Amino acid sequence: MAPPLIPFFVLAFLLVITSLMVVFQRNVVHSALSLVAALFLIALFFIMLHAPMVGVLQILIYAGAIMVLFLFVIMLLNPAALEQRRGVWWWFGTVAALILGGLLVAVMTGTEPPPDPAAATALFGSPEMLAKSLFTDFVLPFEIASILLLVAIVGAVVLAKREP
Amino acid sequence: MVPLNHYLILSAIVFTIGVIGVLIRRNLIVILMSIELMLNAVNLTFIVFSRFLGSMEGQVIVFFVMAVAAAEAVVGLAIIIAIFRHRQTLDPSEMQFLKW
């Protein structure tokens, strides 16, 4: 096996295991902690793929902010009742999802890689390059994203407010 | 360098695990976490293609996906809190009050 493949397969194996733990743990807190691990592993993949800025943002925003939010809600609600074990839907859901997964893997296997994988320049994926794209070609979506976040903040406050 | 298809298949597997979570779990918080997992699988695909095509657009799109995912998580969790306050449950099969 070629040397660069070994870290890939180790990380991929860990990612699949932690993703499975997110879904199949019965305790919500354990699911959330597995999700933190999975997001961290995906951030490592981003860094391996010459996207260090996005990888750091992934750790900061996802593994940091969003997961703290999840854990805070779990703590606030403290859902004591464990959900019921497998019902009929369990088998329907699993079979349907596995069919979808088989189709996805078939499509992905057939994808032809681009003929000339672009050589990574020293700047590729750096904050400079990302900012240059973000503030020239994508400046309108960037502003719309800020409005979206504002709307989300206001919406969350209104929704979670206790009714008088 | 790791071939493109390895990354794509990994991303497909993680996405499928997320779909399984949405379909079989009966806990709103875990369903929301499975959705985050699916979004991240797609993000991985974007980053892989950005790397192999040598263009920055994929990374910019991932940036926007993160912003939308943050907004989605915030609003989703607020809705979960509001529902839990009314019904004292997180089971989506209990929530049938819009069903005819």
Image (cartoon, rainbow, N blue to C red):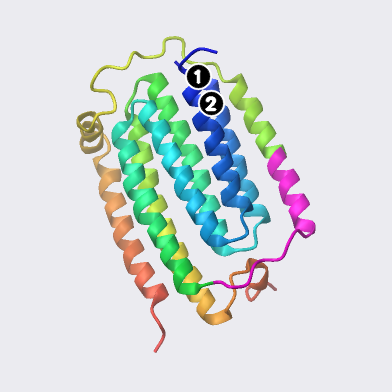
Q: Secondary structure at mark 1?
A: helix
Quote the CA–CA distance across marks 1 and 2: 6 Å
Residue shown at the point (24%, 19%) measured from the top left: A122
A50, A7: nearer the viewer: A7
Residue shown at the point (56%, 44%) measured from the top left: A19
* Residue A147 drawn at (x, y percent): 28, 56
The residue at the far right in this view is A88
Tell me if residue A99 is in the magenta stretch: no
Q: Compared to A141, does A49 lie above or below?
A: above
* Quadrant of the rendering where the C terminus of chain A is positioned: bottom left
**Amino acid at dot 2:** Phe
Indicate left or right for A56 with B6 as reference.
Answer: left
**Amino acid at dot 1:** Leu
* Residue A119 drawn at (x, y percent): 34, 13
Can marks 1 and 2 be said to lie on one chain? yes
Q: Secondary structure at mark 2?
A: helix
Q: Which residues are magenta?
A: A79-98
Are dots 1 and 2 in contact, CB under 8 Å?
Answer: yes
Whether residue B60 is visible, yes or no, is yes
Q: Chain of mark 2?
A: A
